[in-house]
C-alpha cells in the first residue's frame, strides 16, 4: 500500500504566484517523521524540512511554509512568490518508528513544479 | 566535513555486464541506506546496512543485486548481469544512527544507464 501520496504530478505556475504541494500519508504509528526534499534538474536531493508527529506547529522558512494536519494525515508545502529557481521535483517522505521500519524513508511519487517567467 | 560521496556519478554498462556503485558515508556515520529512483518515479528503499551487517534488504530485488558495507572502505551496491530495467539513479544516504530523528544525508547519486 502506498504510504505517501502526492496526487499532483505536475504544477505549472507563473513567477510570483504561490504554489501548494499536497502530501497525504498513511501510518499506524504514533511516532513518525515527515520530510520534504527538493530535486532540481541537476538531480541531487536537497533536504528542506523534517517534522515529527508530535509537533503540529506550522513552520515558515523564507518563502517556504509547511502545514501539518494530523487529523487529515497531510503535510502540505507552500512556496510563496515562486521563482524560476524553484522549478524542481518535490518529494514528500515518511519515516516510521517501528523496529522493522529501521528508519527508512518512504517517498511519494513527487510533484514536478514548473515556474515560468 | 565532506558530505556523502558516491562514485561514479554516471555509469554506462551494456546488458550482461556488472555495475559497482560506491558510497562513502559522512565521517562518523555507520548507517547506510540505498535507494533507487526509476525514471519519472520517486525513490524506493532498497537496503539498509551497518558496518559489516545487512540489517534490512526488503527492497532489494532477489536476484543479481547485492550490497555490502565492509569494516573498512565504502559501501558497495553491486548489480550483476545488468538489464535495461536497471537503468536508474541510485542514491545512498548515511546517518549517525538508525534512530529516525537523525537525519539521513543523501549523496549526489549514481546514474546508471544500461545500453
Image (cartoon, rainbow, N blue to C red):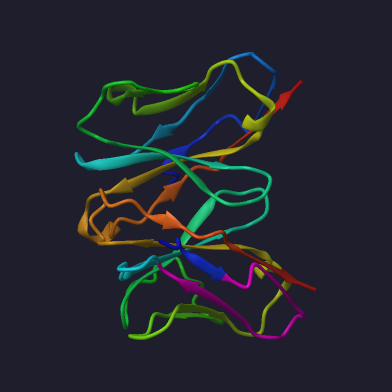
Q: Is residue A66 visible?
A: no
Q: Which residue lies at the image location 23% right of the left edge and 29% below the top edge?
A: A55
Q: Is residue A80 left or right of residue A51?
A: right
Q: Quadrant of residue B108?
A: bottom right
Of the pair A96 and B21, the residue shown nearer to us: B21
Asked if the magenta segment contains residue B11, the reply would be: yes
The image shows residue A98 at horizontal and vertical percentages of 22, 53
Q: Residue furthest front?
A: B1
Q: Residue furthest right?
A: B115
Residue span colored magenta = B7-25
Q: Is residue B88 left or right of residue B42?
A: right
Task: Give the vertical position of A1 relative to A77 (above or below).
Answer: below
Q: Is residue B103 visible?
A: yes
Q: Is residue B33 left or right of residue A38?
A: left
Q: Which residue lies at the image location 54% right of the left edge and 69% below the top edge?
A: B6
The image shows residue B52 at horizontal and vertical percentages of 32, 83
Q: Which residue lies at the image location 35% right of the left edge and 68% below the top edge?
A: B27
| Quadrant of image for the C terminus of chain A | top right
The image shows residue B70 at horizontal and vertical percentages of 37, 85
Q: Quadrant of residue B81?
A: bottom right
Task: Give the vertical position of A26 relative to A42 (above or below).
Answer: above
Amino acid at each position: 500500500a502506498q504510504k505517501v501520496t502526492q496526487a499532483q504530478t505536475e504544477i505549472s505556475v507563473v513567477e510570483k504566484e504561490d504554489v501548494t504541494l499536497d502530501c497525504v500519508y498513511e501510518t499506524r504509528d504514533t511516532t513518525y517523521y515527515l520530510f520534504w526534499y527538493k530535486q532540481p534538474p541537476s538531480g541531487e536531493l536537497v533536504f528542506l524540512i523534517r517534522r515529527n508527529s508530535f509537533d503540529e506547529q506550522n513552520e515558515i522558512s523564507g518563502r517556504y511554509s509547511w502545514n501539518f494536519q494530523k487529523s487529515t494525515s497531510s503535510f502540505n508545502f507552500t512556496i510563496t512568490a515562486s521563482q524560476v529557481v524553484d522549478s524542481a521535483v518535490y518529494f514528500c517522505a515518511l519515516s516510521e518508528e517501528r523496529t522493522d521500519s529501521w528508519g527508512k524513508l518512504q517517498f511519494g511519487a513527487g510533484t514536478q513544479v514548473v515556474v515560468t517567467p | 566535513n565532506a558530505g556523502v560521496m558516491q562514485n561514479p556519478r554516471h555509469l554506462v554498462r551494456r546488458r550482461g555486464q556488472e555495475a559497482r556503485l560506491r558510497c562513502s558515508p559522512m565521517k562518523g556515520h555507520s548507517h547506510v541506506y540505498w535507494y533507487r529512483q526509476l525514471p519519472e518515479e520517486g525513490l524506493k528503499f532498497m537496503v539498509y546496512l551497518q558496518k559489516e551487517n545487512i540489517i534490512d534488504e526488503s527492497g532489494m530485488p532477489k536476484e543479481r543485486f547485492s550490497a555490502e558495507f565492509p569494516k573498512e572502505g565504502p559501501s558497495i551496491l553491486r548489480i550483476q548481469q545488468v538489464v535495461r530495467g536497471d537503468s536508474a539513479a541510485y542514491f545512498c544516504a548515511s546517518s549517525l544512527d538508525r534512530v529516525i530523528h537523525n537525519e539521513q544525508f543523501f549523496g549526489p547519486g549514481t546514474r546508471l544507464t544500461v545500453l
